Image (cartoon, rainbow, N blue to C red):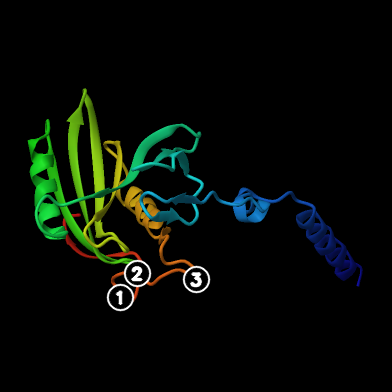
Amino acid sequence: MLRSFIVLITTAAVALLIACQPPTEETAGPEASGETLPRIENQQLGLAVGAVPTQWKVVSGEGETIRLEHLDETGAADGELWIETRSPEVGGVNLVNMIKQSQADYEAMEEGVFKGQVELGTQFGNAFSVRGQFNEAGQAYEERQIFSVHPAQRDLALVMVYRYPAPANTRERTEEMLALFSELEDLSFQPGGSEPASGEAAEPAADATGTNG
């Protein structure tokens, strides 16, 4: 019986010790602390970023381009990302032609290599992601772009570009970019607003098919 009593006391002491421990790093994120992630609304682009993840720093949220910096574990910038629109020179938006043009652009750069494309299903419909590598001013870079049709202005292409030093963890960088793209919102499609021009149902952002992307 004495042995059972000692086991009981020991178990209670361990439980009390665990309960008194400070929160771990896993609970120290914005949600646990009640911090609100920043939101960007860009009227000129007609787009919003619903919530900017913590690894991104907003450089500019106004004008013709939304610009962000990617931060590493120490808080230093180790990549840049921007969101813009592009108007085709002839005809409407053709995403396949944009892929071909990006391939030509990468291959024309110093030590430029086109790494392929991936088809995506996004909240704005079908989109494509391309990836390339090149040198600029003695620095090797990897770059990924996402091409989509603007949800409200169908004569414009919506483009997200993410550039960072190479070599890099391509999978991790890609996941971060897709997570950020999934935060994009059409400002014309807000409560009480008008329907987007496409009228198509949204799909979650995720890699679907592709070639070496």
Residue 190 to residue 53: above or below: below
Q: Which residue is mark 2?
A: 196
Residue density around tag 1, few if under 14, some if 14–19, many if 20 or more, within 10 Å: few
Whole-number angstrom distance, CA of label 3 to CA of label 1: 18 Å
Q: Nearer the viewer, mark 3 or mark 1?
A: 3
Q: Which residue is mark 3?
A: 192
Answer with the quarter of the image where residue 195 lies.
bottom left
Answer with the quarter of the image where residue 112 lies.
top left
Whole-number angstrom distance, CA of label 1 to CA of label 2: 8 Å
Residue density around tag 2, few if under 14, some if 14–19, many if 20 or more, within 10 Å: some
Q: Is residue 76 visible?
A: yes
Q: Nearer the viewer, residue 107 or 61?
A: 61
Q: Quick check: marks 2 and 3 in contact, CB under 8 Å?
A: no
- Element at label 1: loop
Indicate the amino acid at tag 1: Glu
Q: Quick check: marks 3 and 1 in contact, CB under 8 Å?
A: no
Q: Horizontal and vertical percent for residue 83? A: 33, 47
Indicate the amino acid at tag 3: Gly
Q: Horizontal and vertical percent for residue 115? A: 15, 48
Q: Horizontal and vertical percent for residue 105? A: 11, 41
Q: Is residue 26 visible?
A: no
Q: Which residue is mark 1?
A: 200
